[in-house]
Amino acid sequence: KEVKLWGGRFEESVSDAVEKFTESISFDKALYKQDIMGSKAHASMLAKQGLMGDSDRDTIIKGLEEIERQIEAGQFIWRTDREDVHMNIEAALTDLVGEPAKKLHTARSRNDQVATDFRLWCRDAIDTIISHIKNLQIALIELALQNEGLIVPGYTHLQRAQPVLLQHLLLAYVEQLERDAGRLLDCRERVNFCPLGACALAGTGLPIDRFMTSDALGFTAPMKNSIDAVSDRDFVLELLSANSITAVHLSRLGEEWVLWASEEFGFLTPSDKVSTGSSIMPQKKNPDPMELVRGKSARVIGDLVSLLVLCKGLPHAYNRDLQEDKEPVFDSVKAIVGMLEVSADFAQNVSFNRERIKKALPAGHLDATTLADYLGIPFRTSHDIVGRSVALCVSRNCEIQDLSLDELNSLHPIFDKDVYEYLGVENSIKKFRSYGSTGSECVAAQLDYWISKFGIN
Ligand code: ARG
Protein backbone atom coordinates (compact mmCIF):
# COMPACT_ATOMS: atom_id res chain seq x y z
CA LYS A 1 0.00 0.00 0.00
CA GLU A 2 1.16 3.52 -0.82
CA VAL A 3 1.96 5.71 2.19
CA LYS A 4 -0.67 8.43 2.54
CA LEU A 5 0.35 12.03 1.96
CA TRP A 6 -0.44 12.50 5.65
CA GLY A 7 1.12 9.17 6.66
CA GLY A 8 4.13 10.37 8.69
CA ARG A 9 2.76 9.84 12.18
CA PHE A 10 0.94 6.60 11.42
CA GLU A 11 2.23 3.10 12.00
CA GLU A 12 -0.67 1.19 10.52
CA SER A 13 -2.62 1.82 7.35
CA VAL A 14 -6.36 2.44 7.48
CA SER A 15 -8.75 -0.47 7.20
CA ASP A 16 -10.47 -1.18 3.93
CA ALA A 17 -13.82 -0.26 5.43
CA VAL A 18 -12.54 3.14 6.56
CA GLU A 19 -10.87 3.80 3.25
CA LYS A 20 -14.07 3.01 1.40
CA PHE A 21 -16.22 4.97 3.82
CA THR A 22 -14.13 8.14 3.94
CA GLU A 23 -13.20 8.50 0.28
CA SER A 24 -14.74 11.32 -1.71
CA ILE A 25 -12.92 10.86 -4.98
CA SER A 26 -15.91 9.05 -6.45
CA PHE A 27 -17.76 12.38 -6.53
CA ASP A 28 -15.36 15.26 -5.80
CA LYS A 29 -13.34 14.52 -8.94
CA ALA A 30 -15.93 16.86 -10.46
CA LEU A 31 -13.84 19.63 -8.89
CA TYR A 32 -10.67 18.79 -10.81
CA LYS A 33 -10.70 21.91 -12.98
CA GLN A 34 -11.15 24.23 -10.03
CA ASP A 35 -8.55 22.33 -8.01
CA ILE A 36 -5.97 22.69 -10.76
CA MET A 37 -6.83 26.33 -11.28
CA GLY A 38 -6.39 26.97 -7.56
CA SER A 39 -3.08 25.11 -7.44
CA LYS A 40 -1.69 27.07 -10.37
CA ALA A 41 -2.62 30.36 -8.72
CA HIS A 42 -1.15 29.15 -5.42
CA ALA A 43 2.14 28.07 -7.02
CA SER A 44 2.47 31.40 -8.83
CA MET A 45 1.90 33.24 -5.57
CA LEU A 46 4.43 31.08 -3.68
CA ALA A 47 7.06 31.84 -6.34
CA LYS A 48 6.32 35.54 -6.32
CA GLN A 49 6.66 35.59 -2.52
CA GLY A 50 9.98 33.75 -2.67
CA LEU A 51 8.54 30.59 -1.11
CA MET A 52 9.35 28.55 -4.21
CA GLY A 53 11.76 28.98 -7.13
CA ASP A 54 10.48 30.10 -10.52
CA SER A 55 11.61 26.90 -12.16
CA ASP A 56 9.75 24.78 -9.58
CA ARG A 57 6.67 26.90 -10.25
CA ASP A 58 7.00 26.33 -13.99
CA THR A 59 7.47 22.61 -13.49
CA ILE A 60 4.40 22.45 -11.26
CA ILE A 61 2.25 24.43 -13.65
CA LYS A 62 3.31 22.34 -16.63
CA GLY A 63 2.69 19.18 -14.64
CA LEU A 64 -0.77 20.35 -13.58
CA GLU A 65 -1.61 21.14 -17.18
CA GLU A 66 -0.52 17.67 -18.23
CA ILE A 67 -2.71 16.16 -15.50
CA GLU A 68 -5.66 18.22 -16.67
CA ARG A 69 -5.09 16.98 -20.19
CA GLN A 70 -4.98 13.38 -18.98
CA ILE A 71 -8.19 13.81 -17.00
CA GLU A 72 -9.99 15.30 -19.96
CA ALA A 73 -8.71 12.58 -22.27
CA GLY A 74 -10.00 9.97 -19.85
CA GLN A 75 -6.47 8.70 -19.22
CA PHE A 76 -6.11 9.73 -15.61
CA ILE A 77 -6.53 7.02 -13.01
CA TRP A 78 -8.49 8.20 -9.98
CA ARG A 79 -7.35 6.25 -6.92
CA THR A 80 -9.59 5.58 -3.96
CA ASP A 81 -6.57 5.08 -1.74
CA ARG A 82 -5.66 8.68 -2.48
CA GLU A 83 -8.93 9.70 -0.87
CA ASP A 84 -10.06 12.87 -2.60
CA VAL A 85 -9.52 15.06 -5.64
CA HIS A 86 -6.93 17.21 -3.89
CA MET A 87 -4.64 14.34 -2.90
CA ASN A 88 -5.18 12.50 -6.17
CA ILE A 89 -3.92 15.47 -8.12
CA GLU A 90 -1.10 16.33 -5.74
CA ALA A 91 0.14 12.73 -5.60
CA ALA A 92 -0.14 12.34 -9.37
CA LEU A 93 1.85 15.56 -9.75
CA THR A 94 4.57 14.12 -7.51
CA ASP A 95 4.60 10.92 -9.59
CA LEU A 96 4.92 13.07 -12.70
CA VAL A 97 7.42 15.79 -11.78
CA GLY A 98 9.00 14.58 -8.53
CA GLU A 99 10.51 16.84 -5.86
CA PRO A 100 9.11 20.27 -6.91
CA ALA A 101 5.54 18.99 -6.45
CA LYS A 102 6.25 18.56 -2.74
CA LYS A 103 6.43 22.34 -2.37
CA LEU A 104 2.93 22.95 -3.68
CA HIS A 105 1.16 22.35 -0.37
CA THR A 106 3.19 25.07 1.38
CA ALA A 107 0.88 27.42 3.26
CA ARG A 108 -2.17 25.50 2.19
CA SER A 109 -4.49 22.94 3.72
CA ARG A 110 -7.15 20.84 2.09
CA ASN A 111 -9.57 22.83 4.22
CA ASP A 112 -8.99 26.11 2.40
CA GLN A 113 -8.33 24.25 -0.83
CA VAL A 114 -11.71 22.50 -0.87
CA ALA A 115 -13.56 25.65 0.15
CA THR A 116 -11.86 27.51 -2.70
CA ASP A 117 -12.56 24.79 -5.26
CA PHE A 118 -16.17 24.58 -4.20
CA ARG A 119 -16.73 28.33 -4.37
CA LEU A 120 -15.28 28.36 -7.87
CA TRP A 121 -17.51 25.45 -8.85
CA CYS A 122 -20.63 27.10 -7.42
CA ARG A 123 -19.79 30.35 -9.19
CA ASP A 124 -19.76 28.54 -12.56
CA ALA A 125 -22.90 26.61 -11.68
CA ILE A 126 -24.70 29.86 -10.90
CA ASP A 127 -23.76 31.29 -14.29
CA THR A 128 -24.98 28.13 -16.02
CA ILE A 129 -28.30 28.09 -14.16
CA ILE A 130 -28.89 31.75 -14.90
CA SER A 131 -28.37 31.18 -18.61
CA HIS A 132 -30.90 28.33 -18.53
CA ILE A 133 -33.37 30.51 -16.65
CA LYS A 134 -33.02 33.08 -19.38
CA ASN A 135 -33.66 30.46 -22.08
CA LEU A 136 -36.86 29.41 -20.39
CA GLN A 137 -37.96 33.02 -20.01
CA ILE A 138 -37.41 33.56 -23.73
CA ALA A 139 -39.35 30.40 -24.60
CA LEU A 140 -42.27 31.61 -22.48
CA ILE A 141 -42.19 35.08 -24.02
CA GLU A 142 -42.21 33.55 -27.49
CA LEU A 143 -45.12 31.35 -26.52
CA ALA A 144 -46.91 34.49 -25.34
CA LEU A 145 -46.20 36.20 -28.65
CA GLN A 146 -47.78 33.28 -30.52
CA ASN A 147 -50.95 33.54 -28.48
CA GLU A 148 -51.92 37.16 -28.65
CA GLY A 149 -55.48 37.93 -27.60
CA LEU A 150 -56.22 34.46 -26.25
CA ILE A 151 -58.43 34.72 -23.18
CA VAL A 152 -58.35 31.90 -20.64
CA PRO A 153 -60.20 31.37 -17.40
CA GLY A 154 -58.20 32.65 -14.45
CA TYR A 155 -58.50 30.57 -11.30
CA THR A 156 -58.34 31.05 -7.58
CA HIS A 157 -58.81 27.98 -5.37
CA LEU A 158 -58.80 26.19 -8.75
CA GLN A 159 -62.32 27.58 -9.23
CA ARG A 160 -63.27 29.87 -12.09
CA ALA A 161 -62.43 33.43 -11.05
CA GLN A 162 -61.92 36.11 -13.70
CA PRO A 163 -60.92 36.09 -17.35
CA VAL A 164 -57.23 36.69 -18.05
CA LEU A 165 -55.11 36.88 -21.14
CA LEU A 166 -52.98 33.78 -21.57
CA GLN A 167 -50.08 36.15 -22.23
CA HIS A 168 -50.59 37.62 -18.79
CA LEU A 169 -50.32 34.20 -17.16
CA LEU A 170 -47.24 33.24 -19.18
CA LEU A 171 -45.55 36.49 -18.20
CA ALA A 172 -46.28 35.74 -14.55
CA TYR A 173 -43.89 32.79 -14.84
CA VAL A 174 -41.35 35.05 -16.54
CA GLU A 175 -41.50 37.44 -13.58
CA GLN A 176 -40.96 34.61 -11.12
CA LEU A 177 -37.98 33.34 -13.06
CA GLU A 178 -36.50 36.82 -13.13
CA ARG A 179 -36.52 36.90 -9.34
CA ASP A 180 -35.00 33.41 -9.32
CA ALA A 181 -32.13 34.69 -11.45
CA GLY A 182 -31.84 37.73 -9.19
CA ARG A 183 -31.49 35.54 -6.11
CA LEU A 184 -28.70 33.60 -7.80
CA LEU A 185 -26.88 36.76 -8.78
CA ASP A 186 -27.17 38.03 -5.25
CA CYS A 187 -25.84 34.76 -3.90
CA ARG A 188 -23.01 34.88 -6.44
CA GLU A 189 -21.75 38.11 -4.86
CA ARG A 190 -21.26 36.36 -1.54
CA VAL A 191 -19.91 33.15 -3.08
CA ASN A 192 -17.18 35.13 -4.75
CA PHE A 193 -14.74 35.56 -1.85
CA CYS A 194 -11.55 33.59 -1.59
CA PRO A 195 -10.74 31.20 1.28
CA LEU A 196 -7.32 30.24 -0.11
CA GLY A 197 -4.52 30.96 2.35
CA ALA A 198 -6.76 30.44 5.38
CA CYS A 199 -4.87 27.13 5.57
CA ALA A 200 -6.20 24.67 8.15
CA LEU A 201 -8.03 27.36 10.14
CA ALA A 202 -5.51 29.79 11.60
CA GLY A 203 -3.74 31.19 8.57
CA THR A 204 0.05 30.94 8.37
CA GLY A 205 3.26 32.58 9.47
CA LEU A 206 4.67 32.32 5.97
CA PRO A 207 4.68 35.53 3.91
CA ILE A 208 1.91 34.60 1.46
CA ASP A 209 -0.11 37.09 -0.56
CA ARG A 210 -3.77 36.17 -0.34
CA PHE A 211 -4.80 39.13 -2.46
CA MET A 212 -2.74 37.83 -5.34
CA THR A 213 -4.41 34.37 -5.38
CA SER A 214 -7.82 35.90 -4.86
CA ASP A 215 -7.28 38.18 -7.87
CA ALA A 216 -5.87 35.44 -10.05
CA LEU A 217 -8.95 33.32 -9.44
CA GLY A 218 -11.35 36.16 -10.18
CA PHE A 219 -12.61 36.54 -6.62
CA THR A 220 -13.69 39.91 -5.24
CA ALA A 221 -11.31 39.67 -2.26
CA PRO A 222 -9.80 37.15 0.15
CA MET A 223 -12.07 36.22 3.05
CA LYS A 224 -11.20 38.34 6.06
CA ASN A 225 -11.37 35.65 8.72
CA SER A 226 -9.48 32.38 8.23
CA ILE A 227 -11.71 30.44 10.65
CA ASP A 228 -14.82 31.59 8.85
CA ALA A 229 -13.20 30.84 5.50
CA VAL A 230 -12.81 27.12 6.17
CA SER A 231 -15.88 26.49 8.33
CA ASP A 232 -18.92 27.98 6.75
CA ARG A 233 -20.98 26.65 3.90
CA ASP A 234 -23.61 29.37 3.92
CA PHE A 235 -22.77 30.07 0.29
CA VAL A 236 -23.89 26.52 -0.49
CA LEU A 237 -27.05 26.96 1.54
CA GLU A 238 -27.85 30.10 -0.40
CA LEU A 239 -27.37 28.38 -3.73
CA LEU A 240 -29.50 25.43 -2.64
CA SER A 241 -32.17 27.78 -1.30
CA ALA A 242 -32.26 29.73 -4.54
CA ASN A 243 -32.50 26.46 -6.46
CA SER A 244 -35.30 25.28 -4.20
CA ILE A 245 -37.35 28.39 -4.84
CA THR A 246 -36.78 28.03 -8.58
CA ALA A 247 -37.75 24.37 -8.30
CA VAL A 248 -40.98 25.30 -6.55
CA HIS A 249 -41.79 27.74 -9.35
CA LEU A 250 -41.08 25.12 -11.99
CA SER A 251 -43.06 22.53 -10.11
CA ARG A 252 -46.10 24.80 -10.10
CA LEU A 253 -45.67 25.39 -13.82
CA GLY A 254 -45.44 21.61 -14.28
CA GLU A 255 -48.57 21.04 -12.22
CA GLU A 256 -50.49 23.65 -14.19
CA TRP A 257 -49.48 22.30 -17.56
CA VAL A 258 -50.15 18.70 -16.59
CA LEU A 259 -53.61 19.77 -15.46
CA TRP A 260 -54.22 21.76 -18.62
CA ALA A 261 -53.15 18.81 -20.79
CA SER A 262 -55.81 16.58 -19.18
CA GLU A 263 -59.03 15.68 -20.99
CA GLU A 264 -60.90 17.54 -18.26
CA PHE A 265 -59.22 20.85 -19.06
CA GLY A 266 -58.05 20.15 -22.59
CA PHE A 267 -56.55 23.61 -22.87
CA LEU A 268 -53.15 22.53 -24.07
CA THR A 269 -51.64 19.85 -26.27
CA PRO A 270 -47.97 18.95 -26.03
CA SER A 271 -46.44 17.73 -29.28
CA ASP A 272 -45.22 14.15 -29.57
CA LYS A 273 -41.67 15.41 -29.06
CA VAL A 274 -42.41 16.18 -25.43
CA SER A 275 -44.84 13.37 -24.62
CA THR A 276 -44.46 9.73 -23.77
CA GLY A 277 -46.76 6.73 -24.04
CA SER A 278 -47.94 3.90 -21.88
CA SER A 279 -46.62 0.35 -22.04
CA ILE A 280 -50.11 -1.05 -21.58
CA MET A 281 -52.65 1.56 -22.71
CA PRO A 282 -52.17 2.11 -26.43
CA GLN A 283 -54.13 5.36 -26.51
CA LYS A 284 -52.08 7.18 -23.89
CA LYS A 285 -50.05 10.32 -24.49
CA ASN A 286 -48.68 11.63 -21.24
CA PRO A 287 -47.02 14.95 -20.37
CA ASP A 288 -44.24 13.13 -18.48
CA PRO A 289 -41.56 15.81 -18.82
CA MET A 290 -43.60 18.29 -16.82
CA GLU A 291 -44.60 15.63 -14.31
CA LEU A 292 -40.92 14.98 -13.76
CA VAL A 293 -40.21 18.68 -13.45
CA ARG A 294 -42.74 18.62 -10.61
CA GLY A 295 -41.21 15.42 -9.27
CA LYS A 296 -37.59 16.53 -9.37
CA SER A 297 -38.40 19.57 -7.29
CA ALA A 298 -38.60 17.12 -4.39
CA ARG A 299 -34.92 16.25 -4.64
CA VAL A 300 -33.87 19.88 -5.00
CA ILE A 301 -35.72 20.71 -1.79
CA GLY A 302 -34.30 17.58 -0.17
CA ASP A 303 -30.77 18.67 -1.09
CA LEU A 304 -31.28 21.96 0.74
CA VAL A 305 -32.64 20.19 3.79
CA SER A 306 -29.66 17.79 3.79
CA LEU A 307 -27.23 20.70 3.86
CA LEU A 308 -29.12 22.59 6.54
CA VAL A 309 -29.09 19.54 8.78
CA LEU A 310 -25.46 18.79 7.92
CA CYS A 311 -24.29 22.22 9.03
CA LYS A 312 -26.45 22.90 12.03
CA GLY A 313 -24.45 21.08 14.70
CA LEU A 314 -20.89 21.75 13.58
CA PRO A 315 -18.46 23.44 15.94
CA HIS A 316 -15.81 25.66 14.34
CA ALA A 317 -13.74 25.23 12.28
CA TYR A 318 -13.51 22.53 9.58
CA ASN A 319 -15.17 19.18 10.27
CA ARG A 320 -15.04 16.18 8.03
CA ASP A 321 -18.85 16.19 7.92
CA LEU A 322 -18.41 18.99 5.40
CA GLN A 323 -17.27 16.48 2.81
CA GLU A 324 -20.96 15.61 2.61
CA ASP A 325 -21.71 19.05 1.19
CA LYS A 326 -20.82 18.16 -2.38
CA GLU A 327 -23.25 15.54 -3.59
CA PRO A 328 -26.40 17.47 -2.67
CA VAL A 329 -25.06 20.49 -4.54
CA PHE A 330 -24.09 18.50 -7.62
CA ASP A 331 -27.48 16.83 -7.50
CA SER A 332 -29.39 20.07 -7.05
CA VAL A 333 -27.58 21.84 -9.89
CA LYS A 334 -27.99 18.90 -12.25
CA ALA A 335 -31.69 18.62 -11.43
CA ILE A 336 -32.44 22.32 -11.76
CA VAL A 337 -30.60 22.62 -15.07
CA GLY A 338 -32.54 19.62 -16.42
CA MET A 339 -35.82 21.04 -15.15
CA LEU A 340 -35.16 24.38 -16.81
CA GLU A 341 -34.07 22.78 -20.06
CA VAL A 342 -37.05 20.49 -20.34
CA SER A 343 -39.50 23.24 -19.37
CA ALA A 344 -38.13 25.38 -22.20
CA ASP A 345 -38.40 22.43 -24.56
CA PHE A 346 -41.98 21.87 -23.47
CA ALA A 347 -42.83 25.55 -23.93
CA GLN A 348 -41.50 25.35 -27.48
CA ASN A 349 -43.57 22.27 -28.23
CA VAL A 350 -46.95 23.02 -26.82
CA SER A 351 -50.07 24.47 -28.41
CA PHE A 352 -53.13 25.98 -26.79
CA ASN A 353 -56.49 24.70 -27.98
CA ARG A 354 -58.35 27.89 -28.85
CA GLU A 355 -61.63 26.12 -29.61
CA ARG A 356 -61.66 24.15 -26.40
CA ILE A 357 -60.74 27.20 -24.34
CA LYS A 358 -63.40 29.31 -26.05
CA LYS A 359 -66.03 26.71 -25.28
CA ALA A 360 -64.95 26.61 -21.67
CA LEU A 361 -65.05 30.37 -21.13
CA PRO A 362 -68.78 30.93 -20.64
CA ALA A 363 -68.92 28.70 -17.57
CA GLY A 364 -68.23 30.09 -14.13
CA HIS A 365 -69.46 33.69 -14.42
CA LEU A 366 -65.97 35.10 -14.99
CA ASP A 367 -67.52 38.52 -15.66
CA ALA A 368 -69.25 38.84 -12.29
CA THR A 369 -66.54 40.95 -10.64
CA THR A 370 -66.37 43.32 -13.60
CA LEU A 371 -70.11 43.79 -13.30
CA ALA A 372 -69.83 44.48 -9.58
CA ASP A 373 -67.16 47.11 -10.30
CA TYR A 374 -69.43 48.77 -12.84
CA LEU A 375 -72.50 49.38 -10.71
CA GLY A 376 -70.93 52.47 -9.16
CA ILE A 377 -72.44 51.98 -5.71
CA PRO A 378 -70.66 50.89 -2.52
CA PHE A 379 -68.86 47.68 -3.47
CA ARG A 380 -70.36 45.57 -0.70
CA THR A 381 -73.83 46.44 -2.00
CA SER A 382 -72.98 45.73 -5.64
CA HIS A 383 -71.27 42.47 -4.57
CA ASP A 384 -74.59 41.42 -3.06
CA ILE A 385 -76.64 42.45 -6.11
CA VAL A 386 -74.35 40.62 -8.53
CA GLY A 387 -74.26 37.65 -6.18
CA ARG A 388 -78.05 37.47 -6.41
CA SER A 389 -77.82 37.76 -10.22
CA VAL A 390 -75.44 34.81 -10.22
CA ALA A 391 -77.81 32.82 -7.99
CA LEU A 392 -80.59 33.50 -10.51
CA CYS A 393 -78.30 32.31 -13.34
CA VAL A 394 -77.44 29.18 -11.41
CA SER A 395 -81.14 28.35 -10.99
CA ARG A 396 -81.77 28.97 -14.69
CA ASN A 397 -78.50 27.41 -15.85
CA CYS A 398 -77.53 30.49 -17.86
CA GLU A 399 -74.94 33.28 -17.96
CA ILE A 400 -75.43 36.77 -16.54
CA GLN A 401 -75.59 38.20 -20.04
CA ASP A 402 -78.55 35.91 -20.79
CA LEU A 403 -80.67 37.67 -18.16
CA SER A 404 -82.96 40.37 -19.54
CA LEU A 405 -82.79 43.94 -18.29
CA ASP A 406 -86.15 43.41 -16.58
CA GLU A 407 -84.88 40.34 -14.83
CA LEU A 408 -81.79 42.19 -13.67
CA ASN A 409 -83.88 45.14 -12.56
CA SER A 410 -86.14 42.81 -10.61
CA LEU A 411 -83.11 42.22 -8.43
CA HIS A 412 -82.23 45.91 -8.20
CA PRO A 413 -83.26 48.99 -10.23
CA ILE A 414 -79.62 50.05 -10.69
CA PHE A 415 -79.11 48.19 -13.97
CA ASP A 416 -79.13 50.14 -17.21
CA LYS A 417 -78.95 48.74 -20.72
CA ASP A 418 -75.22 49.48 -21.01
CA VAL A 419 -74.77 46.64 -18.52
CA TYR A 420 -74.32 44.31 -21.49
CA GLU A 421 -71.13 46.16 -22.43
CA TYR A 422 -69.59 44.73 -19.29
CA LEU A 423 -70.81 41.20 -19.63
CA GLY A 424 -69.19 38.25 -21.35
CA VAL A 425 -65.46 37.59 -21.06
CA GLU A 426 -64.57 39.59 -24.17
CA ASN A 427 -66.23 42.71 -22.82
CA SER A 428 -65.14 42.09 -19.30
CA ILE A 429 -61.44 41.78 -20.10
CA LYS A 430 -61.48 45.11 -21.96
CA LYS A 431 -62.35 46.88 -18.73
CA PHE A 432 -59.12 46.04 -16.93
CA ARG A 433 -56.75 48.97 -16.87
CA SER A 434 -54.89 49.05 -13.54
CA TYR A 435 -51.11 48.83 -13.68
CA GLY A 436 -50.07 45.17 -14.05
CA SER A 437 -53.61 44.03 -14.81
CA THR A 438 -54.84 41.68 -17.50
CA GLY A 439 -56.15 44.45 -19.79
CA SER A 440 -54.69 44.09 -23.27
CA GLU A 441 -52.79 47.37 -23.11
CA CYS A 442 -51.32 46.55 -19.72
CA VAL A 443 -50.24 43.12 -20.92
CA ALA A 444 -48.82 44.57 -24.13
CA ALA A 445 -46.73 46.94 -22.01
CA GLN A 446 -45.42 44.01 -19.97
CA LEU A 447 -44.63 42.11 -23.12
CA ASP A 448 -42.78 45.09 -24.59
CA TYR A 449 -40.67 45.30 -21.47
CA TRP A 450 -39.54 41.68 -21.80
CA ILE A 451 -39.09 41.84 -25.55
CA SER A 452 -36.71 44.74 -25.25
CA LYS A 453 -34.97 43.33 -22.18
CA PHE A 454 -34.14 40.11 -24.00
CA GLY A 455 -33.75 41.67 -27.45
CA ILE A 456 -36.43 39.44 -28.98
CA ASN A 457 -37.72 40.51 -32.38
N1 ARG B 1 -12.34 15.74 0.99
C1 ARG B 1 -12.41 16.72 2.00
C2 ARG B 1 -13.71 17.50 1.90
O1 ARG B 1 -14.35 17.43 0.93
C3 ARG B 1 -11.27 17.67 1.85
C4 ARG B 1 -10.85 18.31 3.10
C5 ARG B 1 -10.31 17.29 4.04
N2 ARG B 1 -9.65 17.88 5.14
C6 ARG B 1 -9.23 17.17 6.15
N3 ARG B 1 -8.65 17.81 7.10
N4 ARG B 1 -9.41 15.88 6.22
O2 ARG B 1 -14.11 18.18 2.82
Image: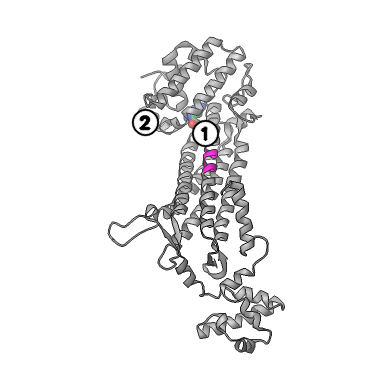
At label 1, counting other C-alpha atoms closer than 10 Å, the crowd grade (few under 14, some 14-19, many 20 or more) is some
Nearer to us in this view, 308 or 348: 348
Looking at the image, which residue sits at the far front?
A: 457
Q: Which residue is mark 1?
A: 121
Give the CA distance from mark 2 to mark 1: 30 Å
Magenta stretch containing residue 126, yes or no? yes
Q: Is the Cβ of the residue at disc 2 closer than 8 Å to that at disc 1?
A: no
| In the image, residue 18 above or below residue 352 | above
Nearer to us in this view, 221 or 322: 221
| Nearer mark to the viewer, of 2 and 1 | 1
Q: Which residue is mark 2?
A: 17
| In the image, residue 235 above or below residue 76 | below
Residue 90: percent from the left, percent from the top? 46, 20
Q: Which residues are magenta?
A: 125-131
- Amino acid marked by disc 2: Ala
137 horizontally vs 225: left or right: left
Identify the residue at image location x=61%, y=49%.
Answer: 452
Identify the residue at image location x=62%, y=18%.
Answer: 208
Identify the residue at image location x=57%, y=80%.
Answer: 401
